Amino acid sequence: MRHRKAGVKLGRNTSHRRAMLRNMVTSLFEHERIVTTDTKAKVVGPMAEKLITLAKRGDLHAIRQALTLLQSKEVARKLFGEIKERYLNRTGGYTSIVKLGPRRGDAAEMAVIELIKPEDWEKAKKKVAKKKTAKKKPETKAPKAASGKAEDKPAPVKAEEKPAPAAKAEETPAPAPEAAAPAVEAPAPEAEASAAPEASTEPKEGE
């Protein structure tokens, strides 16, 4: 088990690995952009950012610490001068890694590691702002769509009002009892007719 053995060996012994990484960091600050494998770029990036932090500190001890890694005093002057001034208002994220795809031959994943320029992060800020506005716009449209649906809902109410003719149809049978009423009153003349003979018989008894 590899307990407490963090880090990447990169297929090299300790002295070879340290010399290679020192050379790559020096080249990165000199040219501000190098092409290497993705694994090496991920190891060089943190080293470069620590050196930029030392440059922002700017004291004598920081210079001596940086010179233990950098292989050129000219590159150290550039780091503590031009590069330091570039990142005074930035607290981190001084490098970026962009993948290029596999290399022909051994198919190793290649990448470009470079120092971020002020123009690059201004563009990044604009992109972030555009994304935020793009996310806000659908939120404003959503309520409109919801309100439109709410406005369309009264249409079914008309369908609910259609039963009103059914009520009229229910009212039409109402005359039926009225027609039945004359049928009930029809026997009344018979009662009158039966009463009439009784009236005729009463005068006969008087006679």
Image: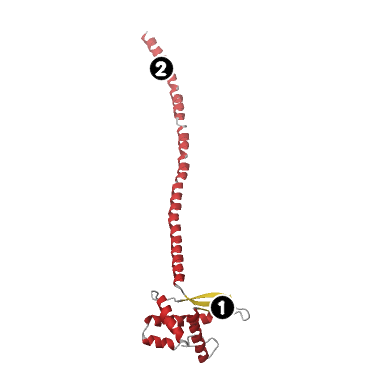
- Front residue of 154 and 7: 7
Residue matched to label 1: 110
CA distance for labels 2 and 1: 126 Å
Q: In the drawing, does residue 98 fall left or right of residue 122?
A: right
- The reply to whether the C-beta atoms of the residues labelled 2 and 1 are less than 8 Å apart is no
Query: What residue lies at 42% left-to-right and 21% top-to-bottom?
Result: 188
Which of the two residues, 125 or 170, is positioned nearer the viewer here? 125
Quadrant of the drawing holding the C terminus? top left
**Residue 55 shows up from this direction:** yes
Front residue of this view, candidates 31 and 14: 31
The amino acid at mark 1 is Met
Q: Give coordinates of residue 20: x percent, y percent.
A: 52, 87
Which amino acid does the dot numbered 2 rest on? Ala
Residue picked out by circle 2: 195
Could you tell me which secondary element the residue under label 1 belongs to? strand
Residue 127 appears left or right of 101: left
Residue at left 46%, top 52%? Answer: 145
Which of the two labelled residues, at mark 2 and mark 1, occupies the earlier sequence position? Answer: 1
| Residue in view at x 56 percent, y 75 percent | 100
Q: Position of residue 159 (x, y in %)?
A: 48, 42
Residue 186 locus on image (x, y percent): 45, 22
Residue at 38% from the left image edge and 12% from the top image edge: 202
